[in-house]
Structure formats: C-alpha cells, structure tokens
Amino acid sequence: MTMDPRAEITFVRLTEVPRHEIVAHMSDPRLAAHMPLLTGRWDDERVEAFIAAKEACWSRDGLGHCGLLANGAYAGWGGFQKEGDEWDFGLVLKSSCFGLGLRIARLALAFAIADERVPYVTLLLPPSRKKLAALTRLGATFIAETEYQGARFLKYRLATK
C-alpha cells in the first residue's frame, strides 16, 4: 500500500517511535539494496543503540534525526548529523512512503534554513541510486564521489543560506 501523497507529516523524536516499527523498517531488504552501510540483523538491542546514537547528536549539536509520521503512522526517519564541519542530511523512508520523500525533505530542510549554524547541508547517496531529479529540484549540486565508512557514495551539497 502506498501512502497518500497529501498525508499530514509530523516530526517526532525517535524515542517516541515504537521499536518494532524501526526493526521492521530497517529489516526491509528493499532498503539494503540502496544502503551500503545497512548490514547485519536489526533487533530491539540494535534499535536502542541506534536511537541512543541519534539522541546523542541532539544533545551534542542541538540538531539530529527524527521519526517521521504520515497521518500518524510511522513513515521512516531522517534529519541532520554533524560530520566534521558539515551537516549531513539523511532520509530513510519505508518503501510505501517513498513518494513522500521530496515533500518531507523540504519540510526537514526548513529546519536547516532557520538555523544560522547550517550554511549548507551535504547529502550522501549510494551510486545505485539512479533517480536523482529530486535533488536537482531541491537545488543540490553534485560535489564528488567519496568514501564513507568503507563504502562509496555520491556527495551532493545544498545551500541553506
């Protein structure tokens, strides 16, 4: 079932998302095809470590990842993570919510635009991603191929100021 493209989008802390929802989402083999860093089995323990790491970003940087709800139902997660001097933006949606990606990205990027500390965001996409027109619509520009945690990515940059 595909999510209604007019769904009401809500951002919540990952701590508010039922753990089983994240386990099921991150265990979907369709995600692993485009997420080279998504390895191993996801269970409650791994979700707890994931949430703790993302909450640590909020504590350290004042910005981080959120749980995403569409009409009150879990749709995925995404947000910002400081990588060195850069703010990286990531968005990981359930396959039934892929059509909401551009809309959710625009809503999330409004946070970066409002934050004076974030002059631009970077986006890392695996080379397996072939449909990149949404990045152009957002105004992102290709920077280079790069390696992150042993995997190859296409790096884009999007000005927020």
Image (spheres, rainbow, N blue to C red):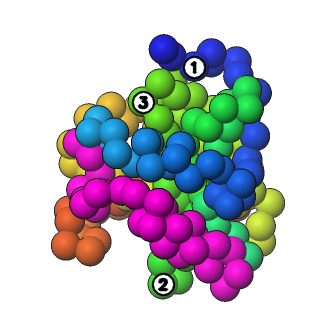
Look at discs 3 and 2 and give the one toward the viewer.
3
SS at mark 2? loop
Residue 50: in magenta span: yes
Residue 118: in magenta span: no
Q: Which residue is mark 2?
A: 84
User: Horizontal placement of 44 versus 152: left or right?
Assistant: right
Q: Which residues are magenta?
A: 32-61
**Residue name at image x 52 percent, y 28 percent:** 97
Point out the tag, 2 or 1, that comes first from the N-terminus.
1
How far apart marks 3 and 2 lie (CA) works out to: 30 Å
User: Horizontal placement of 123 versus 56: left or right?
Assistant: left
Q: Tag 1: Cα neighbours inside 10 Å, few (<14), some, or many (≥20)?
A: some
User: In front here: 97 or 160?
Assistant: 97
Label 2 is placed on what type of residue?
A: Gly
Residue 104 sits in which quadrant?
A: top right
Q: Which residue is mark 3?
A: 95
